[in-house]
Image: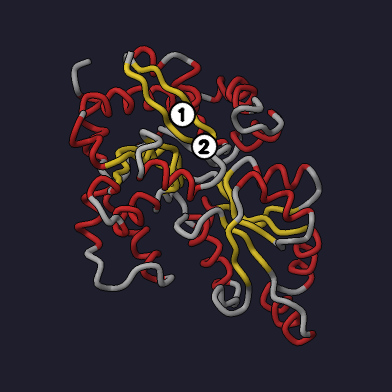
Amino acid sequence: MTALTLGFIPLTDCAPLVVAREMGFFADEGLSVTLSREASWATIRDKVAFGALDGAHMLAPIPLAATLAAARESAAMIAPMALNRNGAGITVSTGLAGAIAASSLAQVVAARRQDGRPPLTFAVVFPYAVHNYALRGWLAAAGVDPNLDVSIVVVPPPRMVEQLADGRIDGFCVGAPWNTMAWATGAGEMLTTTATLLPGAPDKVLGVPWSWAERDRPLLEAVLRALTRAGIWCDAAANRQDLATLLARPDLVDAPASAIARALDGEIIFQRDGAATPSQADALWILSQMQHWGQIGPQVDHAALASRVFRGDLLERALTARV
């Protein structure tokens, strides 16, 4: 058995990693995988970059941003597989939801400014995240400037509901099951989903060091085959309750199985309809968002970076390779 350690954040979309371990799909490929529950996306990025993790459940834009910023080749990353698409949403406090329904978000923002009150505060999980781009696009479409009219902060996913309930933030964009948890506890209402705002956008990927693909392609292919089997299992409606019960464990997502099951009944997809293949179009769209929101400059060669990092060809080879 080859030993590997893969990181994850407690979210419903860590499911393929969990299922691949628990159902023996990793073991079938000759892999002994330890899953490491991490506190934040910054920790995930840094541990993969410095070799403390062999790979991880990762926000889709992180491998692109990390590779662009890498001071050394060993810190460059690739995304050979998308773990899921859709599944996130925008939730606001119940009070703000009522105020928006009574007027509009732009009017609420304007009234707060006129009254001399602090701007609304929204949370995202990380600056380099589809959630950040979805929230900003939603705000802009409502006539609110994300850079001037509101405050946007970073909060780890498991702490979103707590901070919303305590009034430290007014809304957030996060993955399942935390929107469902906000609703279940009465802290907030989900107003829209990333599937509505950005249909089919890649949410999480498997992020691994570029050096792994160069050093041991067969090992990476074994991981990709196991995760493919897991994603197919996760997509099957007959497995949803078992999956929700599994993910609910304290060492995994640590949320009620009922909330996770409700999230799984939503728009999240893992494997079906080609969801697992990270395409060049996916990467180019992410890079366009990074440039639009000022995270990268116009000098970045989008096509070159996309082709280096989003490696759907590696997934294709893994699935056609003879085991």
Frontmost residue, 275 versus 227? 227
Frontmost residue, 248 versus 56? 56
Q: Quadrant of the C terminus?
A: top left
Q: Amino acid under label 1?
A: Pro
Q: Looking at the picture, does residue 47 appear above or below residue 22?
A: below
Q: Amino acid under label 2?
A: Asp
- Residue 288 appears left or right of 111: left
Work out whether residue 273 can be spotted.
no
Count of marks, rendered view:
2
Q: Which residue is mark 1?
A: 16
Question: Which residue is found at the position 75% from the left and 80% from the top?
Answer: 112
Q: Looking at the picture, does residue 270 appear above or below residue 138?
A: above
Q: Residue furthest bottom?
A: 114
Image coordinates of residue 13 in percent, x first then y, are 52, 37
Check disc 1 and report its element: helix, strand or loop: helix
Q: Which residue is mark 2?
A: 13
C-beta proximity under 8 Å, tags 1 and 2: yes
Spatial separation of the CA atoms under disc 1 and disc 2:
7 Å
